[in-house]
Image: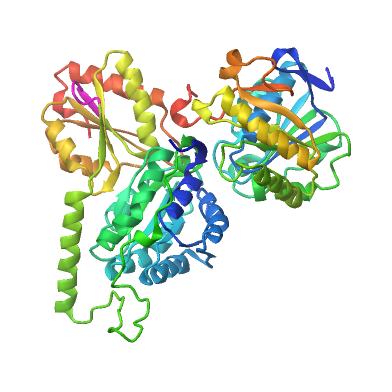
Amino acid sequence: MAEQILMKGNEAIAEAAIRAGCRFFAGYPITPQNEIPEYMAKRLFEVGGTFIQAESEVSAINMVYGAAGAGTRAMTSSSSPGISLKQEGISYMAGAELPALVVNMVRAGPGLGGIQPAQGDYFQATKGGGHGDYRLLVFVPASVQETIDLAGQAFELAERYRNPVMILGDAVLGQMMEPVVLPEPADLAKIPQKTWATTGTGGTRRPNVINSLYLDAELCEKHNYKLQEKYRQMAEREVRYEEIGLDDAEIVLTAYGTSARVAISAMKRARSEGIKVGMIRPITAWPFPYEPFRKTSERVKAFLDIEMSAGQMIEDVRLAVQDRAPIFFFNRMGGMVPTPKAVLEEIRRIDHSVKGDKLGGRLGV
Amino acid sequence: MDSSPTIEVAFGRELEVRRVTVLFGAFGSGKSEIALNLANRLREQGQDTALVDADYYKPLFRSGSLRIPLEKRGIRVILPPGELAGADMAALPAEIYGVLEGGPKVVFDVGGETGARVLGALAGRFRPGAHDALLVVNTRRPDAGTVEAVVAAAQRAQAVSRLPVSGLVSNTNLGPVSTIDVAREGYALVAEAAGRLGVPVKFVALDERLLDKLSPEDFPVPVLPVRRFLLPPWEQEEE
C-alpha cells in the first residue's frame, strides 16, 4: 500500500484533481476553501499546468469554460456566495457540453452568511442553480479519502458525459484532516482524445465550434432533448449511496457530508442502547438515490433526515418515501453543526413515538 | 506565581519554555493542538499563561475556539474582540503588544505559511533571548516529507514572519492511526533538517494515547504529550 499521509479536505481535493490530470485551475479566494487555490498555485506549476487567480468568480468560471473547450482537464472551486456568481458560467458549460470540476465548500448563507459549515446549497447544486434545463453530477463525500476518490473520478465522468461535475462539500470537510492514501497519477497519454475540442484544425478538418446559443427554436429543442437523454443515462448509471445497518433497522437516518458523520456517530450510540437504527447515505445528491428509500420505506417505521439547512434534501427523501413512512427532520443552520447527542435524543424520541403506535404515521414532516 | 524557565514533560524530563513561544509552520502541521497543550501544561504547573490565537487564516479548528474552557482553567486567551474572533481577517488585538512587553508566559499560535505574515507586524517586539520561534513539522503532511522541504519551509516561515526560527518541533503523526514508529521516522528527518538549519529540535509532540508504548530511549529530546482538543463535530462529547 502507498504511504499514508495526513491531509486536509481542501488540499486533498486539489492533489487528487492534479493526479487525475487536472492542468488548469482558475479561482478567486473565499473562506473556507482557500487552501484549494493555495495548493493549486504551488502544485500546478510543478506539473506544467496553469493556475490563474482571476479577478472574480465570474471570470474564473469563464476561464474554465475556455480551458475545457480546448480539451484541458479544468477546475474551479469556491464557497457558496462565489458559487452563486459562477452559476451563469455553469449553465453555459452545461449548454455547451463542457466537462469540468466545480467544487463548492459550502458556508452559511443566505447572502454573505458566515464562514462556518452549512448545507444550504443543495437546491442550487441539484435543482439547477443557473438557468435552463440542465443537471450537474453532484458528489457529496463524507470523508477526506472519499473526497480524493470522487475527485479522481470526476474528470473521467465529466468527459464521458461532457457535463460539469460538482463536489459539494462544506467547511468541516474542507478544513478537517484525516489519514489518506493518494492514487498514482493518471497517465495523461491514456486520457481519451476529445474530438470535439477546439485545438486547431491543422488545416485537416472543419473547425470545432463550442457554443450554447441556438437561435432556431427547433434546433434548440433538439439540443435540449439530447441533453435530457444524457441526464437520463446519468440518472440510470451514476447513482451512488451507502447503506449502513439496514437489515434490521426500524428507524433509518439519512444525511450527507458532515451531517452524515454526525449521524453515524449518533447511530452507533443508539445501537448501543438497543435502538435499531440504520442509515442511507447519499454519495451522489444528483442523481439522488431514490431506490433504497423506496425499498426500505415498505418495512421501516420512520426516517430521520439530518441537514445543516432548513430542509432541502428532505424534498428528495419525500419524493422517494411518499406516505409509506413518517419522515422526521433535525437540523442546524447558519454555520452550526448538529451534535451526535442532539441527534441521539431525536432518535430516542422517534423510537418512543413509533413504539407508542397510536402516533403512527401522523408524526413527522 | 511560578515562573520557572522549564516545565515537566514525559518521563519527568524538563522542557525549557521561554517567556514567549511562537509556533509557526505549514498549515495542518499541528500548531494549534501544540499551543493548546503547551498552554495547558504551563498552567497546570502553576505558571501565569496567555494563549494568543493569531491564526486568522482558518475558520475552524482554531485554538481560540476553546476560549471558555481555557479561561476556566485560568489561561488568558487573546483574540480579536466580539464577532471578529471568528473572522477571516487579521485584526491584531492591542493586548498582544502588552503581553509581548512582559508578564505571563505567552504561547503564540499563528496561521500556516502566509498566515505567519501577521508576525511581521510585530517584528521588533520580540525580545532577543526571551522568545522561541518554533517551526512545527509533521513529515506526514504534503510537502514536508523530505529534509529539503523542511528546510525550505523554515526559510519561508522566516521570510514571511521576519522572525528567525530558533528551533523545530517534531510533530509527525497520522492522526488516529499514528504510531511511535511514525513519530520516530519523522523525528529522524526533522533532526537532520534542524542540523542543516543550525537549530535544535526543541521537543517531540506525541499523541498521549501512545505514551504507554513510549520508552525513554525513543527520543533524545523532551516529549510533550499531546491531547487532541480540536475534534471534528462528530467526535465531540458535548457542549
Q: Is residue B134 visible?
A: no
Identity of the residue drawn at 12% across and 26% down: A299
Q: Is residue B16 above or below residue B54?
A: above
Question: Splitting the image into 4 quarters, where does residue A201 fall?
Answer: bottom left
> Which sits in the foreground, A8 or A119?
A8
Question: What residue appears at the point 61 percent right and 46 percent down from the top-left corner?
Answer: B57
Q: Is residue B201 magenta?
A: no
Relative image position of residue B192 (x, y in whole percent): 72, 37
Judged left or right of residue B226, residue A168 is: left
Tell me, yes or no, if residue A53 can be seen here: yes
Name the residue furthest right. Answer: B128
The quarter of the displayed image where residue A258 is located? top left
Residue B198 locus on image (x, y percent): 81, 39
Q: In this picture, is A132 found above or below A349?
A: below
Q: Is residue A37 left or right of residue B15?
A: left
**Residue A113 position in % (x across, y down):** 47, 49
Instruction: From the viewer's perspective, tell me whether residue A75 is left or right of residue A245.
Output: right
Frontmost residue, A92 versus B132: B132
Say if B161 sits above or below A62 in the image: above
Task: Specify the quadrant that holds the N terminus of chain A.
Answer: top left
Magenta extent: A245-252
